[in-house]
Image (cartoon, rainbow, N blue to C red):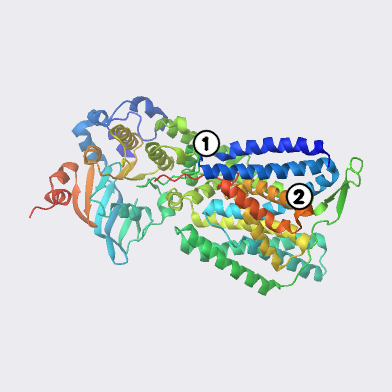
């Protein structure tokens, strides 16, 4: 990863374990993290994020007669934070579901890390490095926080079912190694106190955080966040933004997120794609998008 | 029956019932609930007190009935276990579990008959027959996953339940078409009995060896399965799939593989149940109705709990035998056939999730 050399903030970039993060990250809000780099950071990032990790070309998706997505193309570059915005029903979540392999588009091609596919499959997406969170938290409610996050390690654990059944030797060592990784993530997300609590009992904000933890446990290259801040108060939003920035900058994870809070979107993201009624109406930096008359029309309504 | 022998156990029973009332009552406080609970507690107290007084009158006889009941309860547990496994891992209530016991039993007994008919010695024939019936169960698991469940991925639990009813008829029909529909005796375990404790009780206690074998096998299965579910990656993946299909897929859990594993394990459990039940009753179509007895067991133990299936089975097994003998003297026989269902109804009133079930709290 040659791009590491120009990472703006992190002295220990890329491979750094998450455990070193909380000390520097805690207490910092979005603004502080951004201020460190400011506008200059954005340009730096634009340079180092040249390489396209995922591209979506001419994707159309319909359910029966309803067109959810019509002929949308865009790309996501390595290391960037890419926002997908648009009014309700614009097809944002459908788009994530296409990328993640839950929906199969009727037309179009998805290229991830150079590999072209007509349609994704969830297993292929997960094993090649795409993880995601859901709009309405989709956790394993009966399981503890720890187990939920360990479930995120499923693909990383190699030992076969017979070794696991034996309960000694390689499978147990493996379990312990992965447990360590998960514990570091738990520290990073500041959820140590709920480690053993069944997640169904947690308040909403913490559930969102555990879900992020599960997605991170997969060590994804591309992280899809579907409204990570929906229903949160200001403080929770700041925490979540801080986590997103840290994940992006220190772990080097590429992030695509859907979010309705325009302030957050414009602060966090490097580039924004705007959908309306399943079509792409704008694509560019936050400033370009904000100034685009079509976007203003879509959000405020067209004056006649 | 002396006054003392009734008073002491009656008192113990009342205390137990009071405890049960407090423990099980949980957070409901409505008047109707309270009345129902008190009534149930009183009935339970009287029943337990009466049992205790009879136990004191004739400890040997009581123990014999209790042990026999518990051990036959283990067999209910075995069938219930198959249900729990599938329900935990796929959220499907698998109506076909009884049919799977039939399929496993028929495959085993017919292949064993065939092999011994060829003059193969038992020591070779039995493992071969077990392997063969295991393979049949694997085939069942594969077919059900591929053609029944996979097309219904992400569908409602009720839809999946209906599809297993369909699978039941197909399995029953096919199994009888291929293997025949008679009553086939199976002799894998000794069927004679031990007489224990002759020195302590007049006549001793009669214990069926078969029941003891069944109990042992069930215990081993349960411990192994519980550990597997709780501590391994695959076990975690199974629980994850049960909780949320989409989320499980998103972390890369291969759902079809997991479902195959689950149905295979349920098939193996069915095979074990079939060997024990088949030795007891002969392998025949009526084995399917065992599945009906597993239903109250599940309601009592909780649909999602492996230990629940075991405890539920033991309670039903012991309860129905004790009720049959002791209540039968007072109000006439035939209690064995309905006792489990009444017990299940009572549990539903007090604790709908069952003794060990997860209380599911839906946020709205």
- The chain carrying label 2 is B
The tag on residue A177 is 1
**Cβ atoms under marks 1 and 2 closer than 8 Å:** no
- Between the C-alphas of marks 1 and 2, the distance is 52 Å
Are callouts 1 and 2 both on one chain? no
**A246 left or right of A160 in image:** left
**A31 left or right of A163 in image:** left
Identify the residue at horizontal 41%, vertical 44% (top origin): B363
Identify the residue at horizontal 25%, vertical 53% (top origin): A74
* Image location (x, y in percent) of residue B148: 52, 65
* Image location (x, y in percent) of residue B323: 74, 51
* Image location (x, y in percent) of residue A60: 28, 61
Identify the residue at horizontal 48%, vertical 50% (top origin): B253
**B183 left or right of A190 in image:** right
Q: Which residue is mark 2?
A: B322
Residue extending farthest to the left is A304
The quadrant where residue A239 appears: top left
* Image location (x, y in percent) of residue A57: 27, 58
- The chain carrying label 1 is A
Is there any visible trace of residue B227 in the rendered image? no
Residue extending farthest to the front is B3
């Amino acid at each position: 990863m040659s791009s590491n050399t120009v990472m703006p903030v992190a002295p220990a970039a890329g491979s750094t374990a998450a455990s070193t993060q909380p000390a520097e990250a805690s207490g910092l809000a979005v603004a502080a993290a951004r201020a460190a780099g400011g506008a200059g950071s954005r340009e730096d990032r634009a340079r180092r994020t040249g390489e396209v990790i995922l591209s979506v070309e001419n994707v159309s998706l319909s359910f029966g007669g309803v067109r959810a997505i019509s002929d949308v193309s865009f790309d996501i570059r390595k290391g960037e934070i890419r926002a997908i915005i648009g009014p309700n029903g614009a097809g944002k979540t459908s788009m994530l579901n296409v990328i993640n392999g839950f929906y199969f588009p009727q037309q179009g091609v998805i290229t991830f890390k150079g590999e072209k596919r007509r349609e994704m499959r969830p297993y292929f997406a997960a094993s090649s490095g795409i993880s995601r969170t859901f709009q309405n938290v989709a956790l394993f409610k009966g399981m503890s926080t720890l187990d939920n996050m360990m479930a995120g390690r499923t693909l990383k654990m190699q030992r076969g079912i017979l070794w696991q059944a034996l309960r000694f030797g390689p499978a147990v060592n493996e379990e312990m190694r992965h447990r360590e990784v998960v514990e570091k993530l738990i520290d990073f997300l500041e959820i140590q106190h709920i480690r053993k609590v069944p997640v169904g009992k947690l308040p909403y904000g913490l559930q969102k955080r555990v879900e992020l933890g599960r997605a991170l446990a997969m060590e994804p290259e591309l992280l899809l966040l579907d409204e990570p801040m929906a229903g949160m108060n200001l403080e929770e939003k700041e925490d979540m933004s801080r986590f997103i920035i840290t994940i992006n900058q220190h772990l080097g994870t590429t992030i695509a997120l859907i979010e309705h809070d325009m302030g957050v979107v414009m602060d966090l993201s490097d580039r924004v794609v705007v959908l309306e009624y399943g079509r792409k109406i704008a694509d560019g930096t936050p400033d370009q998008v904000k100034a685009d008359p079509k976007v203003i029309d879509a959000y405020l309504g067209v004056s006649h | 029956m002396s006054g003392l022998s009734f008073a002491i156990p009656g008192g113990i029973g009342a205390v137990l019932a009071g405890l049960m009332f407090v423990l099980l009552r949980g957070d409901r406080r409505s008047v109707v609930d309270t009345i129902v609970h008190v009534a149930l507690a009183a009935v339970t107290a009287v029943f337990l007190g009466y049992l205790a007084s009879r136990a004191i009158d004739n400890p040997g006889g009581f123990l014999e009935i209790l042990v026999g009941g518990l051990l036959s309860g283990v067999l209910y547990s075995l069938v219930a276990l198959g249900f729990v496994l599938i329900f935990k891992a796929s959220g499907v209530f698998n109506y076909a579990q009884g049919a799977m016991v039939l399929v496993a039993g028929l495959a085993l007994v017919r292949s064993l008959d065939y092999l011994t008919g060829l003059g193969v010695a038992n020591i070779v024939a039995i493992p071969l027959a077990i392997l063969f019936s295991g393979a049949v169960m694997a085939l069942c698991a594969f077919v059900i996953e591929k053609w029944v469940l996979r097309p219904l991925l992400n569908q409602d639990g009720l839809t999946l339940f209906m599809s297993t009813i369909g699978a039941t008829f197909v399995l029953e029909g096919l199994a009888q078409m291929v293997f025949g529909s008679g009553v086939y005796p199976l002799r894998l375990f000794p069927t004679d009995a031990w007489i224990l404790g002759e020195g302590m009780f007049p006549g001793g206690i009669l214990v069926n060896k078969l029941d003891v074998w069944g109990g042992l096998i069930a215990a081993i299965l349960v411990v192994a399965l519980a550990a597997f579910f709780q501590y391994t990656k695959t076990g975690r993946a199974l629980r994850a799939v049960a909780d949320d299909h989409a989320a499980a897929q998103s972390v890369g859990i291969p759902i079809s593989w997991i479902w195959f594993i689950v149905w295979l394990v349920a098939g193996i459990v069915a095979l074990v149940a079939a060997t024990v039940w088949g030795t007891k009753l002969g392998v025949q179509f009526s084995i399917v109705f065992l599945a009906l007895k597993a239903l109250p067991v599940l309601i009592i133990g909780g649909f999602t709990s492996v230990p629940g299936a075991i405890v539920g089975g033991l309670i039903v097994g012991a309860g129905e035998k004790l009720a049959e003998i002791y209540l039968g003297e007072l109000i006439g026989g035939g209690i064995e056939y309905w006792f489990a269902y009444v017990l299940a109804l009572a549990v539903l009133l007090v604790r709908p999730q069952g003794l060990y079930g997860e209380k599911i709290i839906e946020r709205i």
